[in-house]
């Protein structure tokens, strides 16, 4: 009698976690000034070729800066890394081909244009992910210790979390008053 071997069924949520675990962030080089076009073109190609399971996120990291003009201050954004785009993907022949053949892409960053994924610490510093596991499972109201920067060794409570920007606001008691400071997740640890 033949026995049928069945794979255990997983729900969609478990499969998405498995995809997230396999996916890594890669840096691609583009023509100068073409970063947003590359991002748009690549997103369109991912949709058209149904590659959403392999190319999960495409980002052009931005940073805010203050510009003073005629006595007025404006907060503006600029590209953190001109000529570079970050791609979170599961590397295989198809996904490599799609990225490499997107108009405006000159290649992957790595030795001999061989794709090398970013380390978790590099991703954390760039703040391009909203992956809670990458930053730790913090909660509003939780007590933390500051381990870096001008507030080193201060204790405080988490007031708000912004996983998208990789920032946390912590209420610290200084000179008998609570003061709200914005820190990176890499500047705090759980008490």
Image (spheres, grey):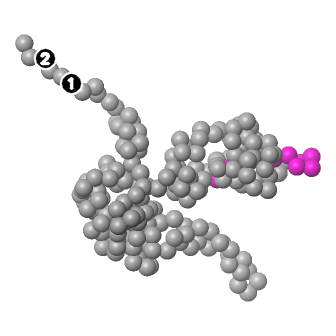
Residue 171: within the magenta?
yes
Whole-percent x, y for residue 155 in the image: 79, 42
Is residue 90 among what the camera can see? yes
Nearer to us in this view, 121 or 157: 121
What secondary structure is found at the residue carrying circle 2?
Answer: loop
Q: CA distance from mark 2 to mark 1?
A: 9 Å
Is residue 42 visible to the viewer in this orientation of the structure?
A: no
Image position of 6 (left or right of 141):
left
Q: Which residues are magenta?
A: 167-177
**Where residue 88 sits: x, y (%)?**
41, 55
Residue hosting label 1: 6
Magenta segment includes 84 = no
Q: Which residue is mark 2?
A: 3
**Image quarter of the C terminus:** top right
Q: Is residue 2 left or right of residue 179?
A: left
**Residue 67: image tag:** none
Position in image of residue 103 (x %, y %) = 30, 73
């Amino acid at each position: 009698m033949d026995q049928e071997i069945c794979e255990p069924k997983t729900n969609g949520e478990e499969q998405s976690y498995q995809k997230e675990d396999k996916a890594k962030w890669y840096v691609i080089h583009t023509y100068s000034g073409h970063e947003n076009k590359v991002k748009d073109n690549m997103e369109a190609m991912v949709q058209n070729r149904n590659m959403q399971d392999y190319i999960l996120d495409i980002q052009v990291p931005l940073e805010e800066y203050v510009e003073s003009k005629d006595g007025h201050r404006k907060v503006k954004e600029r590209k953190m890394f001109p000529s570079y785009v970050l791609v979170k993907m599961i590397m295989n022949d198809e996904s490599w081909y799609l990225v490499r053949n997107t108009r405006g892409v000159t290649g992957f960053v790595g030795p001999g244009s061989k794709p090398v994924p970013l380390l978790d610490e590099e991703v954390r510093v760039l703040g391009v992910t909203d992956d809670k596991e990458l930053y730790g499972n913090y909660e509003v109201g939780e007590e933390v210790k500051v381990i870096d920067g001008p507030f080193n060794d201060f204790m405080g409570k988490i007031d708000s979390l912004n996983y998208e920007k990789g920032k946390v606001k912590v209420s610290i008691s200084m000179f008998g008053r609570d003061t709200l400071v914005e820190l990176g997740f890499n500047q705090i640890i759980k008490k």
